[in-house]
Image: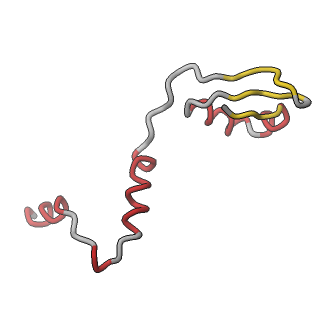
């Protein structure tokens, strides 16, 4: 659960809504005291392809070129052409 003050909420509404969409609950404060709570109304959204693959791509960049192997799917596709 994250806490955000009213001024931040006003200036960064889009970011707060993104957090809600991702399943986070937000406590809204004014003058240091909690005045409300925003909860997601639906389950968190399913991550997109780029989000799913980002860790794989990041890990692949850490493998030295000499130790990389060709993608068998791409090799088969090239062979069939």
Q: How is the image coloured?
A: secondary structure
Indicate the quadrant where residue 20 lies: top right
Location of residue 47 (image quadrant): top left
Q: Residue 46, percent across and down?
A: 44, 34
Give the quarter of the image for residue 5: top right
Question: Where does the N terminus fall, quadrant-wise?
Answer: top right
State the quadrant of the C terminus. bottom left
Instruction: In this rendered view, identify the residue nearer to me: 21 or 14.
Output: 21
Q: Is residue 55 above or below residue 67?
A: above
Count of numbered circles on the image:
0
Residue shown at 27%/72% (left/top)? Answer: 68
Residue nearer the viewer, 22 or 74: 22
Q: Give 72 or 76, whichever is nearer the viewer.
A: 72
Residue at the image point whose x is 40% and y is 69% from the top: 61
Image spot of residue 4 (x, y percent): 77, 34
Q: From the viewer's perspective, is 5 left or right of 41?
A: right
| Picture coordinates of residue 63, whole percent (x, y) | 36, 71
Establish if 80 lies above or below 29: below
Residue 40 screen position, x and y as percent: 59, 23
Farthest residue to the left: give it: 80
Outermost residue, bottom direction? 66
At 62% from the left and 35% from the top, the residue drawn is 19
Q: Residue sitting at 73 percent across and 35 percent down? A: 13
Left or right of 72 in this view: 53: right
Residue 29, compared with residue 80, is above or below; it is: above
Q: Is residue 24 left or right of residue 8?
A: left
């Amino acid at each position: 659960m994250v806490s955000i003050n009213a001024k931040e909420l006003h200036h960064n509404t889009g970011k707060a809504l993104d957090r809600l969409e991702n399943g986070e609950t937000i406590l809204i404060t004014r003058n240091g005291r909690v005045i409300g709570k925003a909860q997601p109304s639906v389950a968190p959204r399913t991550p997109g392809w780029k989000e799913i693959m980002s860790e794989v791509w990041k890990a692949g960049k850490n493998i030295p070129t000499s130790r990389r192997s060709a993608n068998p799917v791409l090799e088969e596709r090239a062979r069939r052409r």
